[in-house]
Image (cartoon, rainbow, N blue to C red):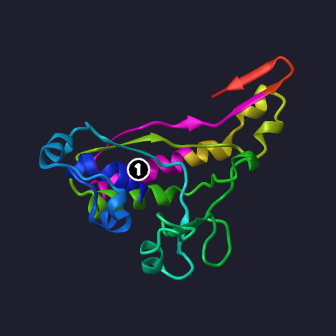
Amino acid sequence: MLLGWFGGPWTDGDYPKSLKETLGDLLPTYTDEEKALIKGSCDFYAIDGYTSFSAYGVKGGLDACVKNRTHPDFPTCAGSVSKLNDGFPIGPAADPGVSWLFDTPTGIRRFLKHLTTELFPSISDIVVTEMGFAEPFESKWETLNEALWDLRRADYFQNYLDNILASIHYDKVNVTGAWGWAICKFLRGSHRVRS
């Protein structure tokens, strides 16, 4: 839903059909002149690809939710969790203070491919504007050396970059940039570390 809301107009000049069907008269209508003005108006498509989630259908089903604006899950009409069908976490967990963040590198490749082949084939290039990881329990670190020994974060970045490269070379997605963020911040005594 959010991808259609923000990504549809500038890539294709209008909101996707599925978004129009879900939101109906809640969605603004563009004139042909506005559609022509918006289409292709951005230089690149930007995504924040920190982690992945498993999606599930809502109680009562998609159609019942889409047709009922009072449904508690309207308008997204889907749910998501950080667990696999068998109950295992979707990947290694980050610091408990960032409870939504799991290391899921293959998800970024699947997402990039889905964006460019299924949702918005007209995307000319994509930039991964944010990705990053918080070491487990880094808020308890007390020395700079502990912060420098961030093997989980290094592993996260290596695997994400590997999957972005696979997306470029094997899936032919035109990824033109990627920015990594280190979600590391602690203050103990005279040491202050920010990455």
**Residue ID for mark 1:** 164
- Give the answer, above or below, for where 91 lies relative to 86: above
- Side (left or right) of 101 relative to 128: right
The residue at the point 60 percent across, 54 percent down is 103
- Give the answer, above or below, for where 129 lies relative to 89: above
Q: Amino acid at mark 1?
A: Ile
- Give the answer, above or below, for where 79 lies relative to 189: below
Magenta span: 157-186
Q: Is residue 123 visible?
A: no
The percent position of residue 139, horizontal first and vertical second, equals 79, 37
**How many dots with numbers?**
1
The residue at the point 48 percent across, 74 percent down is 65
- Side (left or right) of 2 relative to 55: left
The residue at the point 35 percent across, 62 percent down is 114
Label 1 crowd (10 A; few <14 / some 14-19 / many >=20): many
The percent position of residue 144, horizontal first and vertical second, equals 77, 26
In terms of image quadrants, where is residue 185?
Answer: top right
Q: Is residue 163 magenta?
A: yes
- Give the answer, above or below, for where 134 lies relative to 4: above
> Residue pushed farthest bottom?
60
The percent position of residue 158, horizontal first and vertical second, equals 52, 46
Identify the image quadrant of the N terminus. Answer: bottom left
> Residue pushed farthest top?
190
Q: Viewer-proximal residue, 82 or 113?
A: 82
Q: Is residue 82 magenta?
A: no
The percent position of residue 135, horizontal first and vertical second, equals 70, 43
In terms of image quadrants, where is residue 143?
Answer: top right
Identify the image quadrant of the C terminus. Answer: top right
- Side (left or right) of 29 relative to 164: left
In terms of image quadrants, where is residue 51?
Answer: bottom right
Q: Is residue 124 visible?
A: yes
